[in-house]
Amino acid sequence: MKIISWNVNGVRAVQSKGFAETLALLDADCILLQETKAQADQIDKALEGIDGYRIYSNCAERKGYSGVTILSRKEPLQVISDIGIVEHDREGRVIVAEFENFFLLNVYVPNSGDALARLDYRQTWDLEFLAYCQQLQSKKPLIACGDFNVAHREIDIARPKPNYNKSAGYTQVEIDGFSRFLDAGLVDTFRHFHPDTVAYSWWSFRAGARARNVGWRIDYVLTSEALVGKVKQAFILPEIHGSDHCPVGIEIDL
């Protein structure tokens, strides 16, 4: 099974950038999109030329903001939106597809914002989202994919020192929040297979950052420890354009 996760930074925007052709090339069984920035009918219309997938979306109340979508070739047992906490569930950040042997979760974690204005909220989110992941894990193994909006270690960010505790996505609060996911039995699959590889999944649009590979690794595929032995490979695809993020993914025997 091939699972791809990609923050598309607007599904309607990426539609005009060879998106259908890219998805055909990726040939994934499940494609998890973040930051769709559209309502469900708009997402369905944007994806109507992409055959072979069932489409499930969770959209923000605020139009043109946030949003997550799962495209799956196989029909899930059920699809669950949100985590059951009103404060978090207005922004369309979580959708889960349940399959026979695992849960597949798609998340777009809140950004702490300019001047770290939402850092306190982000800290609350991390704790309550982790509790939700632990609930799922108590029932069956979990694959959690998405834009976690944090570079976990120095190797995951091109310029760690000037960004540390100053930029959203690289504060100690956010780093500690992500570490708790690993402490709770989830494995960062890319780092598991590539402990010393420098690879990024997001680049600012400013100052030619992508061309110079001044990036951050903030998109992850995490799996329960019980599934790690089934993962054949974990990868990042920086050659795939269309967004300020690139796709990440795994191949797994399930």
Image: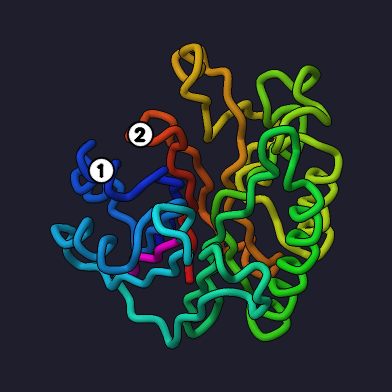
Structural crowding at the residue carrying mark 1, measured as other residues with C-alpha within 10 Å and reported as few (<14), some (14–19) or many (≥20)? few
Pinpoint residue 133: horizontal percent, then vertical percent: 69, 71
- Magenta stretch containing residue 28, yes or no? no
Residue farthest to the front, as pictured: 62
Residue located beneath label 1 in the image? 22
Pinpoint residue 244: horizontal percent, then vertical percent: 44, 33
122 to 101, vertically: above or below:
above
Q: Is residue 124 left or right of residue 200?
A: right
Q: Is residue 48 left or right of residue 115?
A: left
Closer to the camera in the image, 48 or 26: 48
Mark 2 and mark 1 residues within 8 Å of each other at the beta carbon: yes
Pinpoint residue 33: horizontal percent, then vertical percent: 42, 55
Residue located beneath label 2 in the image? 240
Closer to the camera in the image, 168 or 130: 168
Give the residues in magenta.
68-72
- Label 2 sits on what residue type? Ile
First in sequence: mark 2 or mark 1? Answer: 1
Residue drawn at 34 percent across, 81 percent down:
75
Structural crowding at the residue carrying mark 2, measured as other residues with C-alpha within 10 Å and reported as few (<14), some (14–19) or many (≥20)? few
Pinpoint residue 135: horizontal percent, then vertical percent: 72, 80
Cα distance in 3D space between marks 2 and 1: 8 Å
Closer to the camera in the image, 159 or 64: 64
